[in-house]
Image (spheres, grey):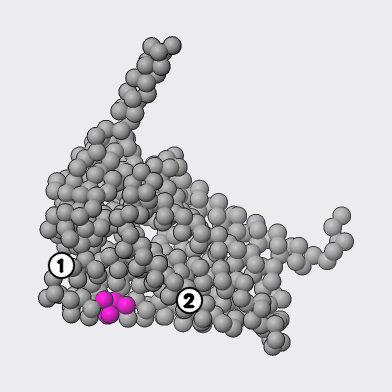
Amino acid sequence: MIAALIIVFREVIEAGLIVGIVLAATTGVPGRERAVAMGILAGVLGACLVAAFAGELAGLFQGSGQEVFNATILLLAVAMLTWHNVWMASHGRQMARELKAAGHQVKTGERTLAALSIVVGVAVLREGSEVVLFLYGIAAQGGTSAAGMIAGGGLGLAAGALVSGLMYAGLLKVPAGKLFQVTSGLITLLAAGMAAQAVIFLQNAGWLEFFTSTVWDTSWLLPDDGQGSLGLFGKMLHTLVGYTAAPNGAQLIAYGFTIVLILVLMRMVNASATTPRGKHA
Amino acid sequence: MKSVLLAILIAATGISQALADEPVEVHLKNHKFSPSTIKVKANKPSMILLYNDDDGADEFDSSSLKIERVVPGHNKANIRIRALAPGKYPFMGEFHAATAQGVVIAE
């Protein structure tokens, strides 16, 4: 039961933190509950599919199917997060105005909601497929532990949701005027961390095998392995901002590149959205 | 012409053998790795061929090796290990971490 609690808790937190950021980033956008719920539902269904075909999936790409799949959905999430931030940079101000004037609300909010719904789906899919496989494995072993497994899994789900909810509540404490800035900063780091993680999966698949040596190692200070309370904190930071105790060169390049790319794109669209036409020399 | 092709073929297979040593076979049974200590050459990529002989899935997980790999029950997985600096790299079966523990030693 304890094992089920810990595993489910850990996976739920990882997906829940991302859901929390998405909810905070879409504060005031109508229809966001539906979009997030759809993302979660699609993620859970996808997780069951991935779990059911885990063996077949792993067999693709010369036995690296799992890694390629993980890298692909992570990069999809990075693209969606980037698009959301860039879209907000060009339409955010306009949207804030329109939100006050009723009528245009649903139209303006919907586009970026779809992107974030995909991000939620990917997060739930990744963590959920592990939970499904783990719980299925315990259930397959014997009936005696089934009740404890359900209890443990339920407690883990509740505790993970609670921690994620606390982070969301904390984000909502940010003054409304600064909230979009904070969430777009968080989403930038979230995307950078995902890109770095995608690089690891690609390296494990035998691709991108350069700059693989460790640049620094702070696992003595803050491990990111999810073991113990310190490790769990490190793992949460890993999910949120991409903290890695012992990053390699390629990871750092992917992390830095993603941040620069998002910031440059945001600045470009922001400039073109706010500069009056004809002002250019 | 034939002999040239043959020479290229021999050279090519020779290189691929030099790059990839035989994978280390590891079995996971009753949520324990055997062998649980795996020695690999330092500064050279290597491969673990992990057989999960249990009914349920487990996840080969190591933050120091940067590997998370789910292996369903009665399934196998070839797990690539990047070129490692000499040292010890612990790993575990995340779903049964109480018993499924092991270490890769690069030397």
Give a yes or no on whether discs 2 and 1 share a subunit. yes
Give me the disc on residue A38: 2
Residue where numbered disc 1 is placed: A141
Q: Position of residue A257 (x, y in %)?
A: 55, 51
Q: What type is the residue that disc 2 sits on? A: Met
Q: Position of residue A41 (x, y in %)?
A: 43, 75
Residue at 28 percent across and 41 percent down: it is B47
The relative height of residue A133 versus residue B35 in the rendered view (above or below) is below
Q: Position of residue B48 (x, y in %)?
A: 25, 43
Residue at 63 percent across and 77 percent down: it is A109
Disc 2 sits on a residue from what chain?
A
Quarter-of-image position of residue A110: bottom right
The relative height of residue A178 versus residue A195 in the rendered view (above or below) is below
Distance from Cα at disc 2 to Cα at disc 1: 33 Å
Report whether residue B90 is seen.
Answer: no
- The numbered mark, 2 or 1, whose residue comes first in the sequence reads 2
Q: Is residue A148 magenta?
A: no
Q: Position of residue A256 (x, y in %)?
A: 53, 52
Quarter-of-image position of residue B98: bottom left
Residue at 34 percent across and 41 percent down: it is B82
Q: What type is the residue that disc 1 sits on? A: Gln
Q: Which residues are magenta?
A: A153-157
| Left or right side of A204 for A22 | right
Identify the element where label 1 is drawn: helix
